Image (tube, rainbow, N blue to C red):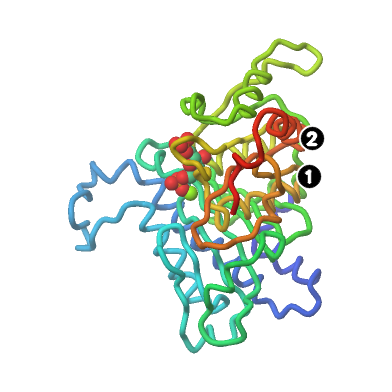
Amino acid sequence: MKVKTLGQFIIEKQADFPYAKGELSRLLRDIGIAAKIVNREVNKAGLVEILGETGETNVQGEKVKKLDVFANEQFIAAFKAGGEVCAIASEENDDIIPIDSEISKSAKYVVAIDPLDGSSNIDVNVSVGTIFSIYRRKSLSGPGTMEDFLQRGTEQVAAGYVIYGSSCMLVYTTGRGVNGFTLDPSIGEFCLSHPDMKTPADGTIYSINEGNYLHFPDGVKKYIKFCQEEDKATQRPYSSRYIGSGVADIHRNLISGGIYIYPTTTKSPKGKLRLLYECNPLAFIVEQAGGKATDGFRRILDLDVKELHQRTPLFIGSANMVDKAMEFMKTYSSEAAAVKN
Ligand code: AHM
Ligand code: MG
């Protein structure tokens, strides 16, 4: 079988954008390279203790970094070296990182990233991920500014995620469908393994942190009970699956069919997940695969982005399941209880 690498695929797809000069392609390629470096570190995370690399310094005399800090630095370094973006927003940094360098002077894009999503799973050998979102800049020249990031999800030029799982996969969209690539460690290349991914319209999996049940809106509580009811025709009860790494849960549901919900809770009255670099990119991908993403009432991609680290509730996955959950929200939870951005 002929293998197509991420690099080959990106070059082929560049022809879809006749006026593009290849910057986006180079940016995606840079993300692929940084992802491979992060994957290498994720793979040996469990060895840190026995290799004696914990504590302050490692064998090279460098400070040992937590994986999330390491991933953040890797991606930022890749973007700075690549010269295709004029600013970066990261979950790990309070403010945007404007890039002021000779090579990024004419950069057209900005990138928002969650370098290592699923923080509670980092130390326990459970899948984690990276999520990224690319926008065309709004500012005219020089280093990027805040206004470059305060764009609706509908303005995304590309978005994707990497899942550091039992294999490492990179999944991305440029608004013309979704394609998934699996890292072949023997050749060190992401290879096209999931062309034109489509998510089932229905599914039998629901993913939610049920430990927060008492603090959920009534619409969500009732929807969970609906998922648990016996009904042969709709294959209920559904299965509950919750990894606690959004990328992994949403990736599984994308392939198998299912819904992932992170609603408002009394502890997180605006939801937990971030609009700019978690919900918008995941919503773009899932919509491109035929699914839906809302905050329980409104489409995620249409929400106004007013702050870098803005939070929103998220209902994402198979279209019919998201519709059903929204019906419950409409009936049992007032929209006023949902987040106003
Ligand atoms: P993080 O960016 O700090 O890792 O938080 C995002 C993660 C999602 O990946 C995951 O679905 C969710 O938070 C888990 O949260 P909880 O532990 O509250 O269920
Ligand atoms: Mg995150």
Quadrant for residue 111, please give it.
bottom right
Q: Amino acid at mark 2?
A: Ala
Q: Label 2: which residue? A: 201
Q: Considering depth in this image, is 310 or 257 the residue closer to the camera?
A: 310
Residue 218, position as x, y percentages in the image: 60, 27
At label 1, which amino acid type do we have? Gly
Sequence-first tag of 2 and 1: 2
Where 272 sits versus 309, above or below?
above
Residue 37 bears which disc, if any?
A: none
Disc 2 is placed on an element classified as loop
Mark 2 in CB contact with mark 1 (< 8 angstroms): yes
Residue 175: percent from left, percent from top = 75, 59
Horizontal arrangement in the rendering, residue 12 relative to residue 30 (left or right): right
Q: Is residue 231 above or below residue 335?
A: above
- Residue underneath mark 1: 290
Residue appearing at x 43%, y 68% in the figure:
95
Is the CB of the residue bearing disc 1 within 8 angstroms of ligand 1?
Answer: no
Based on the displayed image, in which of its 4 quarters is residue 93 positioned? bottom left
Crowd around label 1: few <14 · some 14–19 · many ≥20 (10 Å): some
Q: Position of residue 217 (x, y in %)?
A: 58, 31
Q: Nearer the viewer, residue 181 or 131?
A: 131
